[in-house]
Amino acid sequence: MEKVITIFKELKPNDFRVLTAIEKGMQKYQNVPVSEMANHTKLNEEYISLTLDRLHKKQLINRWSEKFVGYHLNAHGYDCLALQKLVTEDVLASFGKSLGVGKEADVFEGLTPSNEIVAIKVHRQGRVSFRQIKRTRGYTADKHHLSWLYASRLAAEKEYEALTTLYPLKIIVPKPYGQNRHVIVMEQIIGDDLYTIKELPHPERIFDEIFVNIRKIYQEGQIIHGDLSEFNIIITPKFKPLIIDWPQWISVTHPNALLYLTRDVTNICNFFEKKFHVHSDPQIVVKNITNE
């Protein structure tokens, strides 16, 4: 991302117009011809070709030249488009250091125009098996042709939808600031992953707070996390839990809703029993959440 930010600062308005034209063209073409970009941008093909050469040297696009010359965005070009939109919409003012690298996303520090410190989450779906993503992610179920970039965008859109649904309900999730393409801007997350913590003061209280919120998420938010475990719960310095990583959420009306909810609940119950000796019955907890 350091390289992307350096390049981003060098780009001109027409560079973004051409990158956007390639993105639009990728809905129809695997490799977008120059003529398609000209139709979209209303720039002449000679100027576009010079721009493409420059963008290619900056490694923001890939060139294909077998039957004809065509171009497609790579991850760096997609990053630039998302950042440009977040900047122009006054969501983001600056990009900072890396806060973490995961299997499906990178997280960085950032600043808003009002100097609030935020977390910038960049979804990277291409790091895991593409076939596994299509098989296990609900948001890809109806997409026959799916690129890595589009899969990342869908993940970010779905996660942002969960945050914007739950945060106004005063549920323990990060505050959302904005989202574009595969990038989400949310409040800075300070704390430690639950699975790394060796000792907790009053673990029963934290256990109860987690499940009070899961019940509220179910009852008021009408959604289920779908992938909840000790790996996506943060414990803040004030020993408050925060539930993160929402791209796999499902609606409570999903045919397998009870199965996913039971799995989420069982993961947390088993972890607290094994590590902090907090005993519970997952089936009773599920019935409490669903009001059965």
Image (tube, rainbow, N blue to C red):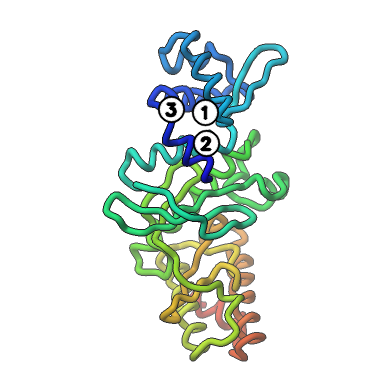
267 vs 1: above or below: below
Image coordinates of residue 3 in percent, x first then y, are 53, 41
Please give the label number shown on residue 16. 3
SS under mark 1? helix
Quarter of the figure with residue 232: bottom right
Q: CA distance from mark 3 to mark 1?
A: 10 Å
- Report the amino acid beneath label 3: Phe
Q: Write the residue at 59% across / 89% down.
A: 278
- Report the amino acid beneath label 2: Tyr
Relative placement, left or right, of 42 versus 230 is left
Query: Which of the two residues, 64 or 23, is positioned nearer the viewer here?
Result: 64
Q: CA distance from mark 2 to mark 3?
A: 10 Å
Quarter of the figure with residue 82: top left
Query: Which of the two residues, 77 or 235, is positioned nearer the viewer here?
Result: 77
Image coordinates of residue 90 in percent, x first then y, are 31, 44
Number of callouts in the render? 3
Q: CA distance from mark 2 to mark 1?
A: 8 Å
SS under mark 3? helix
Please give the label number shown on residue 23. 1
174 vs 8: above or below: below
Circles 2 and 1: CB distance less than 8 Å? yes
Query: Which of the two residues, 30 or 93, is positioned nearer the viewer here?
Result: 93
